[in-house]
């Protein structure tokens, strides 16, 4: 089974692309969703996060206080690096177990979607990497609308991410999500190529 990664900057449309792959029967592991789950369910990880970010990192009911965490880590690169160093190994281990299950289920390939596949170096455990790209202005507009955050908030997040041109250097496949080319057509072409590689 081929292990495929999908990454891209915030607002590039990774999730939309993944949902198209799912319509072709391909399973998708969303690393960001799993990370949030592990941050609340993994007791050791939770304790480390509390030590790093304080008791306000969680609500009384045990749920993540994402706004509080975001306010800290998007303004303090050291804290962001420290948080990633706690979360990424837990997600990597969880992802490996998931890929094993997908292999046993007989899938020709499976996809791991993550914003920081390259930065966390976890792309090196995958066979192929798809990078979803979109014009900067379009990405900013999408995130402002989706997350109901001001422009400065989106720009701060983008600043913390890898440069778009640098990210593209790692790509085996590139999907242009610019509202001009058919996303379904691009996904279908890559799907056909990956099936052939199996």
Image (tube, rainbow, N blue to C red):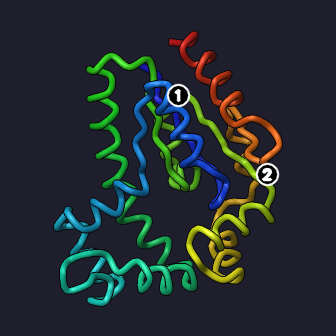
Q: In which quarter of the image is residue 149?
A: bottom right
Q: Quadrant of residue 69?
A: bottom left
C-alpha separation, residue under disc 1 versus residue under disc 2: 21 Å
Q: Name the residue under label 1.
A: 127
Disc 1 residue crowd, few under 14, some 14–19, many 20+, Cα 10 Å:
few
User: Going 27% across and 37% down the picture, which residue do you hit?
Assistant: 97
Relative horizontal placement of residue 173, taking residue 85 as reference (left or right): right
User: Residue placed at 57% from the left, 30% from the top?
Assistant: 128
Look at the numbered discs 1 and 2 and tell me whether their residues touch, using CB distance below 8 Å: no
| Circle nearer the N terminus (1, 2) | 1
Q: Where's residue 113, x and y in %?
A: 49, 45
Q: How crowded is mark 2: few (under 14 residues within 10 Å), some or many (20 or more)?
A: few
Q: Quadrant of the N terminus?
A: top left
Percent across and percent down for residue 9 are 65, 57
Q: Please determine whether, in this image, residue 177 is positioned above or below residue 111.
A: below
Left or right placement of residue 91 versus residue 117 in this view: left
Looking at the picture, tell me which residue is in the foreground, 24 or 154. Answer: 24
Residue 197 lies, in percent from the top left, at 56, 12
Which residue occupies 43% across, 17% down? 108
- According to the image, label 2 marks what residue? 165
Relative vertical location of residue 105 with respect to residue 12 in this rendering, above or below: above
């Amino acid at each position: 089974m081929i292990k495929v990664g999908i990454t891209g900057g915030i607002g590039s449309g990774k999730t939309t692309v993944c949902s198209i792959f799912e319509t072709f029967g391909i399973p998708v592991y969303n690393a960001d969703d799993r990370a949030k789950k592990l941050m609340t369910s993994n007791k050791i990880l939770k304790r480390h996060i509390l030590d790093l970010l304080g008791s306000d990192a969680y609500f009384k009911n045990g749920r993540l206080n994402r706004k509080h965490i975001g306010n800290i880590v998007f303004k303090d690169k050291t804290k962001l690096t420290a948080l990633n160093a706690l979360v990424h190994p837990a997600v990597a281990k969880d992802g490996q177990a998931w890929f094993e299950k997908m292999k046993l289920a007989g899938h020709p390939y499976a996809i791991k979607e993550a914003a920081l596949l390259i930065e966390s170096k976890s792309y090196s455990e995958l066979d192929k990497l798809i990078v979803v790209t979109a014009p900067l202005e379009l990405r900013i507009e999408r995130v402002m609308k989706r997350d109901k955050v001001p422009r400065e908030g989106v720009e701060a997040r983008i600043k913390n991410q890898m440069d778009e041109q640098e990210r593209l250097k790692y790509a085996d496949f590139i999907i242009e999500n610019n509202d001009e080319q058919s996303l379904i057509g691009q996904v279908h072409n890559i799907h056909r190529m990956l099936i052939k590689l199996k």
